[in-house]
Image (spheres, rainbow, N blue to C red):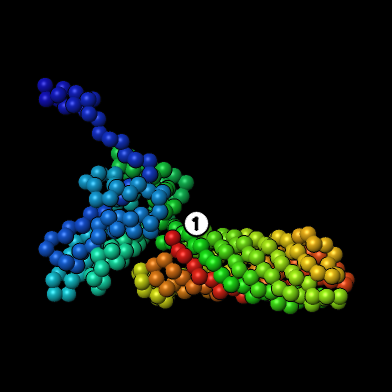
Amino acid sequence: MLSLALALLLLLDPPAPAPDRPSLVVQIDRGDEACVDVDLAHLHDAVELALGWALEHRGDAPAQPWDTAVTIACLAEGEPQIEVAIRDPQTGTNASRVFDAPDETDPERRAEILALVVSDLVRSTWHALEQEAPAQLEPSDPDQTSARTRRRARAISRRPTAPYLAGDGFVVRSYFGEGAPKLMLGEQVELIHRPLRNLAWKIDGEIMAWRVPAELAVLKTMTVTVAPALLGYAEFGGSSRPGRPGRMAIYAGAGARVGGVRTLGEGSASSKFRAIAGPLATARIEVACGRFVRLALVGETGWLAVGPEDPRGLTMRGSWANGTFVIVSAF
């Protein structure tokens, strides 16, 4: 009779199926200690921002067997330390790490720091999936996870903390061809997506202008261009904690710059925009000034293969080089 009752209960109220993507629960064991006195809602928002939206963020809900569960607890009063423990069904990991408690007094700032600790621990745990056969990643317990869920967890472990960078910069460019502008100034906006650690793509758009001396008169010259590029990068030094400046990144890659140039004045062959295009190589050094703000210096060189060639006016052919100072937002 007991077996029949259990069977009926399962039929009437079956257990919820495991999700098809990783899920995360972050809980705090506050106790009587102040070292984990954080803004809980801000902590969960910061964890979600750091890890992205490819996984299900369940806040501090009761942990299910298929959840990756992280618990934060205080260890000592005299020199407060925090223990961050993780139970992960994707890798079968049960582990913990001990960190010094954040010395910030603002609960929101403490939450940002702890969120980065949590995201780094989750990423490093899921990075173990890189060691398994990449084709299948079959789970040992199908009730708690699946091959699809484990593949998603592995993909999340490959991503950097801030996968998107948006910037606004000031550009100084020089063209070296005969009859080309020796100096142009302008503004550039950029977007960088870093889908993987050490790999990124970038696109920027810029507008530049200058008065260029020509044979007959000074030409008012304006260029409008866009430039997609594929980049490799590395981050090192400093601290990855929010508000701790000094962490650096170096990028290098190649792409192309395409757009148009317009000239006004006596000797201009046309007042309409004329096409310019050419390949480019670029390098970039970036310094973190805090959780969301970075500064970057960008160098670029290229060769205009397509452009106007006016014997008595403007020539936009040959090599160029420029430098850009960029204020970057990371998110």
Residue occupied by mark 1? 195
**Quadrant (top left, top right, bottom left, bottom right) of the N terminus:** top left
**Quadrant (top left, top right, bottom left, bottom right) of the C terminus:** bottom left
Tag 1 secondary structure:
strand
Q: Is residue 155 above or below residue 290?
A: above
Query: Could you say which is closer to the camera, residue 128 or residue 296?
Result: 296
Say whether residue 93 is visible. no
Query: Could you say which is closer to the camera, residue 287 or residue 16?
Result: 287
Q: Amino acid at mark 1?
A: Pro
Instruction: Describe residue 74's horizontal placement relative to residue 264 as left or right.
Output: left
> Which residue lies at the image location 16% right of the left edge and 60% below the top edge?
30
Q: Position of residue 285 (x, y in %)?
A: 53, 74
Instruction: Describe residue 194's horizontal placement relative to residue 89 as left or right.
Output: right
- Count of numbered tags: 1
Q: Is residue 281 above or below residue 164?
A: below
Q: Is residue 6 above or below residue 274?
A: above
Q: Position of residue 264 (x, y in %)?
A: 78, 67
Q: Quadrant of residue 314?
A: bottom right
* Mark 1 neighbour class, 10 Å CA radius: few under 14, some 14 to 19, many 20 or more: some
Say whether residue 82 is visible. yes
> Which residue lies at the image location 25% right of the left edge and 44% below the top edge?
65
Query: Could you say which is closer to the camera, residue 225 or residue 147?
Result: 225
Q: Position of residue 313 (x, y in %)?
A: 84, 71
> Which residue lies at the image location 25% right of the left edge and 65% below the top edge?
107
> Which residue lies at the image location 44% right of the left edge and 52% below the top edge?
155
Instruction: Describe residue 205's horizontal placement relative to residue 241 as left or right.
Output: right
Q: Position of residue 245 (x, y in %)?
A: 40, 75
Q: Residue furthest right?
A: 311
